[in-house]
Amino acid sequence: MPAGRGRLGLVAATIVVGAAGVASAQPARAIDVPEAEPATTHLLAGIDHRGVPMVDAAVGLGDLATVGLTLDDRIAVGGGAAAASSEPMLAAWFRLGVPADLLGRGAPAVVLDLERSVDERLRRAGRRGTPFAELRLLATRRVAGTRIGQLSLTAGVTLADAAPHLAPSLRPAAALGWTPRRYPRTTLLADVGWAVRVVDEVPAVAGAIGWGVRYQVARTFHIDLAVRHRADVGLEGSTVMVRGLITPP
Amino acid sequence: MRKREQSRRWRVGALSIACVVATSATAIAAPGDGDPDPDDAPPAPSPPADAAPIEAPPPRVVRPPDGTAMALLASPPAPAPLPELELGLLVAPSARMLPGGAITATTGIDTGGGFEGDVRAGLGGVAEFGVATTDRLRVRVCPTCDAGAVHWSTSARFVMGVDDERLFRGQPALALGFEKSFRNAHDARESRFASLYLVASRRVGRAVLHAGGVVWDAELVRDDGGGAVALHDGAFGRMVRPFGGVDILARERAHVMADVSWLPELRLDDGGADRITLRPMLSWGVRYQASPRVLFEAGARVPDIGAADLLDAQIFVQARLVSRYFERAIQRVSAR
């Protein structure tokens, strides 16, 4: 079976399985920047207009932590900045934090999130891949109002590294989710973050802006339509994505 | 040589997996008599202090078909609840030991392709014995190379100690442990390590604090007869390190843990000769009790804090199976 059909099949299966869901849960991710939800169980799968797949599966542990496995499509690899294209890389992540209001009334949820590529065995097997790691400290505050609907604000800092090594520096990250009162099944998403790119085997970090819409098809299933712009490749290098998000009860 | 090494690794791996499977089988099989395990039952609500004493159920009288009373049978005494299991920290040693007869088997993987296996048994509530295989021991094959893991490093461990408040008022739990590895062949060398530690653990509210000191030793022997280096060749101070951690019961059935410990790093051909150094490792994570017999642990390890190398960090996931079958059996025998 051609790879393209396999990818489409994966997305279709995700949509079908998700549409059968019956209960609701809080999605914990904007486009690329995660929200500070300490424990989340979800399956996010999608594909972009170049046919590059992405998958993110997570299991929450005791309301405090989440461990996940992802096929991350944010890493760009290529022979030149303009030619760099997304290369999905298998990575694991671990998130530990405190839920909202635990540290005091109105206190935001805070998480420490470490993502790291699962690279060593893949490299030995001759697969492509650049080891990378990213540490994020994020806080999310959710606000609900009769006029504005629901607002989710995320802010934090991120520290990224990729082989051979990046100069360590903290960079800001932020995400916004807005569910208007008149459209309770629709959430507008936007985020500002950073993504690793590897050009001629030299890693660097480039800014990335994502925006899109999340539509709640069923109580446990959402569809995301999103766009990601990268600062290093210009507008023509932007990526259009469709994703299905399953959040079991 | 390489074949022999591979064969030995397979044997060690098979042994570890067999231990984990055996403990799982024991955990699943318990209790063997078909009765529901009291551990699985939700804890009974304790009566208020001023509540009237509950009357004991009347003795059971067995009557044969002719209607005459045959015997007076007392109801079997309800088994006493087993003590709460405290499993210590993620990496650093702890003075919390398994109760006598309790067995745990842990298996896990990390993002570096490493495999962990650990089987422990409590001995009389004052000692613990265990066998483990780990990939935490690190080797740097050249001075500028990134450190990698020494796979399938197998060790045995014996710990003895006393619980809180046994010796004097305010006394923390204390444990003296010794861990020693088997010889491990890798990189045209053989390595082994040993550690002796003394640790104290003290409960403070919902948290348990752990602190101690460890004496490390390690040896690296070249296959080509080029000599051996050992950590004890240097000053004693190079072998001694403090360690510690905290374990917080942050949610029902969920513990958050963080610890700092030390591990040997083998540096091959560093300055013309092999060297062994101790490097500090930071770990943090969570332990979630999915059921009385199954726990999941996940977290992150930064093997060399001083290097501040994010790429060195590993994310791990492990499952821990608990069997208290023998503990309960011992309790029943003692009750008789």
Image (tube, coloured by chain):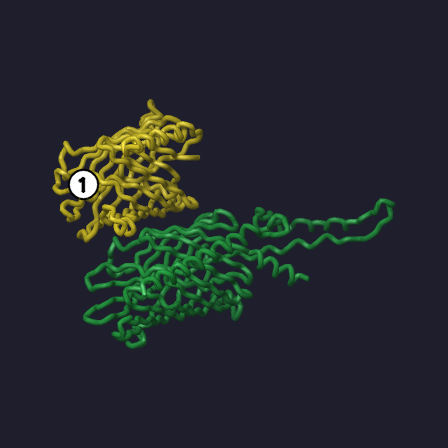
Chain colours: A yellow, B green
Q: Visible in this render: residue A116?
A: no
Q: Position of residue B170 (x, y in %)?
A: 49, 66
Which is more toward the observer, A94 or B56?
A94
Using residue A31 as the reference point, say whether residue A41 is left or right of it.
right
- At 46% from the left edge and 64% from the top edge, which residue is drawn? B95
Q: Is residue B176 above or below residue A66?
A: below
Using residue A157 as the reference point, say whether residue B316 is left or right of it.
right
Which is more toward the observer, B263 or B114?
B114
- At 61% from the left edge and 52% from the top edge, which residue is drawn? B32
Using residue B85 as the reference point, say whether residue B245 is left or right of it.
left
Quadrant of image for the N terminus of chain B: bottom left
Q: Is residue A196 above or below residue B271?
A: above
- At 39% from the left edge and 55% from the top edge, which residue is drawn? B257
Q: Residues within 10 Å of mark 1 (few under 14, many from 20)?
A: some
Quadrant of image for the C terminus of chain B: bottom right
Which is more toward the observer, B29 or B186?
B186
Using residue B155 as the reference point, say whether residue B219 is left or right of it.
left
When asked about the image quadrant of residue B151, the answer is bottom left
Callout 1: chain: A
Q: Position of residue B129 (x, y in %)?
A: 48, 65
Q: Is residue B95 above or below residue A66?
A: below
In what element is the residue under mark 1? strand
Which is more toward the observer, B291 or A176?
B291
Residue at numbered disc 1: A207
Q: Position of residue B321 (x, y in %)?
A: 49, 53
Amino acid under disc 1: Gly
